[in-house]
Each structure stands twice: as C-alpha cells, then as structure tokens.
C-alpha cells in the first residue's frame, strides 16, 4: 500500500512550513503549537550554520545573516544527513546564488571557503602516515587542504579588506595530530609547489631544495627552507623521519 | 544498567572518569567519517564502555522511503563500534529529499503505518538486525485517523521491530495531549521494549511542554519511570539524555544513580512478589 496522496501532502505541507514559515492548514493541527516546529527546525539549522561561519556572520550583522540563512533553508533541499556537514551546502548556495552579497563583498566566496575548510579539516577522518624505511625524509601531514584565494581573508580583518588587496594568496590548513587544532599557513608559490610534491610522496631535503631552485638561487632556497621547516615541523605541517 | 548520552560538550571531563555509566550512547550522524581530537576521545571511551547507537536522520516516516546509502554507512558504523543496539525515532526528518534536522510528527493514519513499517523492515533487512523505534514527543497531531497508541502498536507489530520507550516523551505527550501516561504505557507491547530513555524537559506554556533534554528530570517523570519499571518485570538498559544546558557531571551522576536505584527497587519488588 502506497502512502495516500493526502497523507503525502500533509507531511509535505508540514515540512514546507518548517522550511519557509508559510503555513497551509492541515486537518487536526494545533495551530498554536505547530509554530514550535518551525522555530526548532530553523534554530537547529541557524545555529549550525552560524557556528560554522562566525566571521561572515559578524561581517553581515545579525539581521542580514538571519535573512540569508532563511533564504538558503527555504529554497534549498539539504542533502547531508549529518548536520555538521550541512554548512558546506550553505557555502555552496551563497557562492552560486547570492549575487548581491557576492558583489557587495568581493572576498565573500574566499571567506566562506576558508571558514568551511577550517571545519572540514577539524572533522576529517584520521589519516595515518606510512613511513618508509629510508630515513631523513620529509612527510606532509595528510590531514590538510590547500586553497588559493583572491583576497587575504586569513591575514586581514574582513571589514578592512579592499580591492587593493586583490591578488593571489595560497593557504594551507592542517590539523595538528596531537591537539586536533586546525592551523593555517600563508604560503608563497614555491612552497605551494613543495607541498604539492610532498602530497605525491615524501622527499629528501635535496629534492625540496631542487623544487625551490626553480624559483630562487640555492643559498636563498636553503635559508627559506630552513626557516619554513622550523615552523612546519613545530606545528606539524611537516614530519621528518 | 544505566548509561549516558556521550557528548563532545563534556568529553574532556568524561575522559577523567568523572562519570560512571554502564554504557554510552551516540548518534551515528555525529561520528560517521569523522576524525580528529574528539574522535580520539570517543575511541578511548569505546575501549571502556559498550555503545548504544541512537540515530537522528534515518527518517523512517519519510514519504519517499529511506536512504539506502546512508543505512549502509550506519551498518558499517555499527560493525566498527560493535554497537549493542541501534535505535531511531518514529517520526520523519526528511521530506521531498530535503533534510530538516528535527523530528516531525507522523500523521496517525493507516497508510502511514504501512509506509513506516515498510521502511523499518527495509532498514532491518539491510542492517541484518532489529532496530528499536522511539516513541517521540510531539506538540500537535497531524490529520489523525487513529489514536497514538494504535499507531505505535500497529507499526511495532507490522514492522516486527523493537520499541525504545522514552518515558519522558510519554509524560510530555500525556501533558500536551491531555491523557494519562499511566494508562498509555500499559497499552504498549511491553515485551518489545528493549531500551528506555529518560530526560528532562521545558514547560514553555501552561499547556505545552517541549522535549528539550536541557533540564534535570522532574519527580513526576521519575515516578512514571518507577511505574514503568514495575510493569517490565525485567532489567532493561536505561539511558540518561542531556543535550543542552549541561550541568556539573556530579548532577548527571546523581540522576544516573537515582535511575539505578529506582530500577533495582522495582525489580526487587517484582522478585519479592513472585517469591511470596
């Protein structure tokens, strides 16, 4: 026996009310109490999205933020069964639908992407580094994401970013295996190259210096790498074994 | 045995052995494909405690049926964690292929009984185990054509599933819909009850209670729990749920101890009655 059209309709009407706040009368419903479902459902979604994008919320202000969350939730069919993952759909929605906001805040897509990746890296499944028998190799932390942005959303407060800041910025976000904290590193193009190569396989210092020498002289490469290595080993972006 | 809903909010405190539950419960949705700091803590807790798994997004009441890929992920999670029990809610949280992340009430109708039962049977087939289905709290009926008790009993029978009896939910529903919970509970098929939930709630109006899991358990709910346990005539795992407004863990331990005592006394009373 299939669900009768009227039962299907009642369930759909209730679900749509929770999504949009537009109530269509359903037989037997306590209209005073039913509003709590809209409130509870929206609050769940709102809280999850807000905790994912605190900087974007602050940039928009409470009123505008609530409106854009409402536009997202009322118009989109959320696919994720995991509420912590749902804010990714919010980010994708804003980037593909909210042109007015994207025009007003040229760095918005970058900012949302950066805030989302912080969550994604914090939550991503654990990955084990398989060390080779060969020693003195550098390994990249596999719990990592690399992004390129057009605005320095990781270096400046959002409200202070202007068109003059436009450029190419490279950022890695990785998870510290001991603390679980997500740390970001501002990268130059040569070090993006190094990290991308390390994602393929572990490298010796000489191999890394060879990559850097595509961009600078050996002496500069050595000095830059040793500076980078010190920080990268400390914050577990790289491991040496 | 009395367990506790394991939450990230108190995971650090919990790792210091500040609570002494018999088991822990989590929602698979919060842990599937998740790693990092909290997962490590969860893994440590799993070394020490049996796990009960209580889902949120299965949506057995969905008009469009269940998400088979998701059920397979749950199955893997149950296997990996050696879960003792998997339970879900008698509600829908997904409609027209859109997740809503809350438990919406089902229309109490014959065709909904068939639809939900079909969905539960399909889940049980994939999981190769029976699931326990929870009687949810609700704040309004939706186009009812039968009573709540008929709706629940018909589903438990047709789906051949187990029952998760949330005593607080029955109290909340009795208050909100003006029936006596002590008349409602004996009408359930108590032989199917495999798991019990206990929690606090919030009274938001003179005629409405919301099931928040954000307050301490109140005495009338303890009283209903005692009444329930005296009907059960057997030991059943009981979970203390606390999702918001988390107090000092001593308060949670006090509540678990109280539940343990009430349950033990109810069983003792039953055993004494048999002997005499």
Image: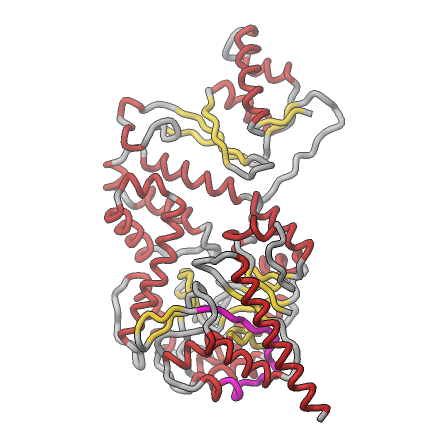
Q: Residue at x 37, y 84 (%)?
A: B178
**Image spot of residue B95 (x, y percent):** 40, 66
Relative to residue A177, is residue A58 drawn left or right?
A: left
* Quadrant assignment, res A149: top left
Q: Magenta includes A61?
A: no
Quarter of the image that includes the N terminus of chain B: bottom right
* Colour mode of the rendering: secondary structure
Q: Magenta residues? A: B185-200
Q: Magenta includes B196?
A: yes
Q: Is residue B69 visible?
A: no
Quarter of the image that includes the C terminus of chain B: bottom right
Relative to residue A233, is residue A10 drawn left or right?
A: left
Q: In terms of depth relative to the viewer, which is nearer, A89 or A36?
A: A36
Q: Establish if A100 lies above or below B53.
A: above
Relative to residue A197, is residue B98 drawn left or right?
A: left
**Image spot of residue A118 (x, y percent):** 46, 39
Relative to residue A180, is residue B212 drawn left or right?
A: left
Q: Is residue B229 visible?
A: yes
Q: Establish if B243 lies above or below B112.
A: above
Q: Residue furthest bottom?
A: B276
Q: Residue at x 65, y 81 (%)?
A: B267
**Image spot of residue B153 (x, y percent):** 52, 84
**Image spot of residue A111 (x, y percent):** 36, 36
Q: In terms of depth relative to the viewer, which is nearer, B190 or B13?
A: B13
Q: Residue furthest right?
A: A133
Q: Residue at x 31, y 32 (%)?
A: A158
Q: Establish if B258 lies above or below A28.
A: above
Q: Establish if B185 lies above or below A173.
A: below
């Amino acid at each position: 026996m299939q669900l009768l059209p009227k039962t299907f309709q009642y369930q759909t009407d209730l679900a749509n009310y929770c999504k949009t706040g537009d109530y269509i009368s359903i037989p037997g419903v306590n209209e005073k109490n039913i509003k709590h479902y809209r409130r509870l459902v929206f609050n769940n979604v709102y809280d999850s999205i807000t905790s994912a994008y605190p900087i974007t919320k602050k940039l928009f202000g409470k009123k505008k933020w609530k409106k854009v969350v409402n536009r997202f939730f009322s118009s989109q069919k959320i696919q994720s069964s995991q509420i912590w993952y749902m804010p990714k759909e919010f980010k994708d929605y804003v980037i593909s639908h909210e042109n007015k906001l994207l025009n007003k805040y040229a760095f918005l897509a970058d900012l949302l992407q950066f805030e989302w990746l912080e969550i994604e890296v914090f939550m991503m499944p654990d990955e084990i580094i398989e060390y080779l028998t060969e020693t003195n190799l550098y390994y990249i932390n596999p719990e990592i994401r690399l992004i390129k942005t057009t605005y320095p959303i990781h270096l400046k407060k959002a409200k202070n970013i202007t068109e003059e800041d436009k450029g190419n910025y490279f950022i890695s976000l990785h998870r510290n295996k001991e603390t679980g904290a997500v740390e970001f590193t501002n990268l130059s193009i040569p070090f993006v190259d190094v990290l991308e190569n390390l994602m393929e396989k572990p490298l010796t210092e000489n191999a890394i210096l060879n990559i850097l020498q595509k961009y600078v002289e050996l002496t500069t490469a050595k000095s830059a790498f040793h500076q980078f290595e010190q920080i990268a080993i400390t914050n577990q972006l790289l491991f040496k074994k | 045995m009395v367990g506790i809903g394991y939450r990230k909010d108190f995971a650090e405190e919990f790792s210091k052995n500040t609570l002494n539950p018999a088991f822990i419960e989590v929602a698979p949705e919060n842990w599937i494909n998740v790693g990092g700091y909290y997962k490590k803590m969860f893994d440590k807790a799993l070394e020490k405690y049996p796990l009960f798994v209580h889902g949120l997004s299965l949506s057995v009441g969905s008009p469009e049926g269940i998400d088979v890929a998701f059920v397979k992920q749950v199955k893997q999670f149950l296997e990996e964690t050696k879960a003792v029990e998997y339970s879900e809610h008698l509600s829908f949280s997904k409609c027209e292929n859109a997740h809503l992340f809350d438990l919406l009430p089902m229309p109490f109708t014959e065709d909904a009984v068939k639809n939900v039962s079909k969905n539960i049977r399909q889940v049980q087939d994939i999981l190769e185990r029976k699931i326990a289905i929870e009687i949810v709290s609700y704040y309004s009926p939706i186009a009812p054509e039968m009573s709540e008790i008929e709706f629940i009993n018909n589903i438990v029978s047709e789906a051949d599933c187990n029952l998760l009896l949330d005593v607080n939910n029955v109290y909340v529903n009795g208050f909100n819909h003006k029936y006596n919970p002590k008349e409602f509970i004996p009408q359930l098929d108590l032989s199917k009850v495999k798991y019990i939930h206990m929690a606090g709630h919030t009274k938001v109006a003179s005629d409405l209670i919301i099931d928040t899991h954000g307050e301490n358990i109140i005495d009338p709910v303890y009283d209903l729990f005692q009444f329930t346990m005296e009907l059960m005539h057997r030991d059943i795992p009981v979970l203390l749920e606390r999702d918001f407004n988390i107090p000092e863990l001593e308060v949670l331990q006090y509540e678990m101890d109280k539940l343990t005592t009430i349950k033990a006394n109810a069983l003792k009373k039953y055993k004494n009655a048999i002997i005499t």
